[in-house]
Image (cartoon, helix red, strand yellow):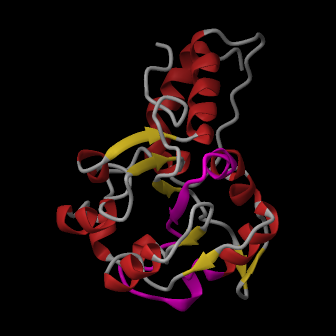
């Protein structure tokens, strides 16, 4: 198969405003993040963009707030954790689209980082709404998809957005796809497949594939 998608290495992003779709669906207990693994995995992509003087806007979902604002699913704690890991200021805004977001972005300088509020506070995210995604796409010059855990979903920030702006993959998405391709096409033996998670319907196709190629 081979990787045939454009990544952030393949486009001129110097000094541009970039919208990054990250996967910050982290576990929370009483408003505290109990594992920052998903946040830390986004750092190479963000650092690459910072090294090229980009303005970075980050969007993500968290949990299942059912299309309405719910403070227990706010991404605000993620901004604080990302700030510590990245070693630079990360601003947060309690909106995802709208005039307030545009105004904040217009005040950003090169190298600034802004995290938007939970995409799933808007029902239009999961319905893949075109008008919603036009507003999202208009925030930046380039869209970077780096949320490996949700790219199989037909949501506004994973599907429709690619039809409205220049779109490339981030370094985490590229890394994960290359790892899958290696396992599927040229695995080291013996290959032991361990499948976890609750939603079997999402995994049935890959389970059937592993029945064919796995030793155990």
Residue 90 screen position, x and y as percent: 66, 73
Between residues 56 and 145, which one lies in front from this camera angle? 56
Report the residue at 73% width, 77% height from top: 80
Residue 62 screen position, x and y as percent: 54, 71
Reply yes or no: does residue 193 show up in magenta: no
Furthest-left residue in this view: 131
Residue 87 screen position, x and y as percent: 81, 65
Q: Is residue 66 visible?
A: no
Is residue 118 rendered to the left or right of residue 87? left
Q: Which residues are magenta?
A: 47-76
Q: Is residue 96 visible?
A: yes
Between residues 174 and 106, which one lies in front from this camera angle? 106
Residue 129 screen position, x and y as percent: 21, 64
Quarter of the figure with residue 83? bottom right
Between residues 35 and 97, which one lies in front from this camera angle? 97
Between residues 57 and 82, which one lies in front from this camera angle? 57
The quadrant of the rendering that contains the C terminus is top right
């Amino acid at each position: 198969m081979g990787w045939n998608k454009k990544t952030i290495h393949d486009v001129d992003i110097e000094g541009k405003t970039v919208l990054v779709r990250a996967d910050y669906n982290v576990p929370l207990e009483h408003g505290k993040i109990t594992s920052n693994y998903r946040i830390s995995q986004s750092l190479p992509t963000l650092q690459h963009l910072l090294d090229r003087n980009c303005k970075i806007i980050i969007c993500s979902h968290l949990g299942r707030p059912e299309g309405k604002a719910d403070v227990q699913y706010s991404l605000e704690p993620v901004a604080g954790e990302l700030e510590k890991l990245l070693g630079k200021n990360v601003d947060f805004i309690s909106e995802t689209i709208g005039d307030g977001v545009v105004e904040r972005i217009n005040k950003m300088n090169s190298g600034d980082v802004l995290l938007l509020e939970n995409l799933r506070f808007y029902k239009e995210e999961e319905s893949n709404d075109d008008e919603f995604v036009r507003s999202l796409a208009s925030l930046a010059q380039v869209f970077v998809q780096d949320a490996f855990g949700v790219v199989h979903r037909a949501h506004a920030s994973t599907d429709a957005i690619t039809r409205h702006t220049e779109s490339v993959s981030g370094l985490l998405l590229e890394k994960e796809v290359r790892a899958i391709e290696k396992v599927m096409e040229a695995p080291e033996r013996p290959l032991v497949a361990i499948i976890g998670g609750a939603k079997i319907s999402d995994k049935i196709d890959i389970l059937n594939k592993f029945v064919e190629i796995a030793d155990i």
